[in-house]
């Protein structure tokens, strides 16, 4: 009988070891929930950093328009009109009175788009800079006149 009882004990030990090998469904679900929460936190952080990077890129690009616009002004004694826009930095506008004075192009290739792939806005005289011009991006929301607009009238841009 001792052989029989030792065989039962071995089977019992083996069975209890086999039961302890895997994770319970609750444990697996708990790990999945934790992973989903961590993943969503990382995604939110990355998107926030991406938006901040795009805002900084827009500020830098807006600042780069200053020199070509000033060169245009030095040559023609005026800034491009609102209707001529930033395209006047690439080719002389057809309605330009002194086209012989136009010494451009003042930009290398094309007028760049903002980081959200939308055109920069331009006005001369500007609403915020009535003696010169305003250059701005519509910002992340793409709507003009909202708090997220990024313009050359903001201190950090100039």
Image: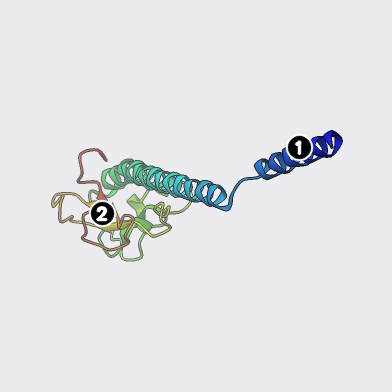
Image quadrant holding the C terminus, namely: top left
Give whichever of 47, 113 is nearer the camera.
47
| Helix, strand or loop status at disc 1 | helix
Estimate the x, y position of residue 9 in percent, counting from the top left: 76, 37
What is the distance, in whole Å, between disc 2 and disc 1 at their CAs? 76 Å
Q: Is the image coloured rainbow, by chain, by secondary structure, or in one colour?
A: rainbow
Residue 122: x %, y % from top left: 28, 57
Q: In the image, residue 119 lies at what x, y percent?
A: 38, 59
Which quadrant: the N terminus?
top right
Residue 54 drawn at (x, y percent)? 39, 47
Q: What is the total number of numbered labels drawn onto the structure image?
A: 2
Q: How crowded is mark 2: few (under 14 residues within 10 Å), some or many (20 or more)?
A: some
- In the image, 89: left or right of 12? left
Looking at the image, is 67 positioned above or below residue 110? above
Please tell me which residue lies in front, 92 or 136: 136
Read off the residue under disc 1. 9
Mark drawn on residue 149: 2
Which structural element holds mark 2?
loop
Q: What residue is drawn where x is 32% and y is 61%?
A: 142
Residue 39 sits above or below residue 158 on the image: below
């Amino acid at each position: 009988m001792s052989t029989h009882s030792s065989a039962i004990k071995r089977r019992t030990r083996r069975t209890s070891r086999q039961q302890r090998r895997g994770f319970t469904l609750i444990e697996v679900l708990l790990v999945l929930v934790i992973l989903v929460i961590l993943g969503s936190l990382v995604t939110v952080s990355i998107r926030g950093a991406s938006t901040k990077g795009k805002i900084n890129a827009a500020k830098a690009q807006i600042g780069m328009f200053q020199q070509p616009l000033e060169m245009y002004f030095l040559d023609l004694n005026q800034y491009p009109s609102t209707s001529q826009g930033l395209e006047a930095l690439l080719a002389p506008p057809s309605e330009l009175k002194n086209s012989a004075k136009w010494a451009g192009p003042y930009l290398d290739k094309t007028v760049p788009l903002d980081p959200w792939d939308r055109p920069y806005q331009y006005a001369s005289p500007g609403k915020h800079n009535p003696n010169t011009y305003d250059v701005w991006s519509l910002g992340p929301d793409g709507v003009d006149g909202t708090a997220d607009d990024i313009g050359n009238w903001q201190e950090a841009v100039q």
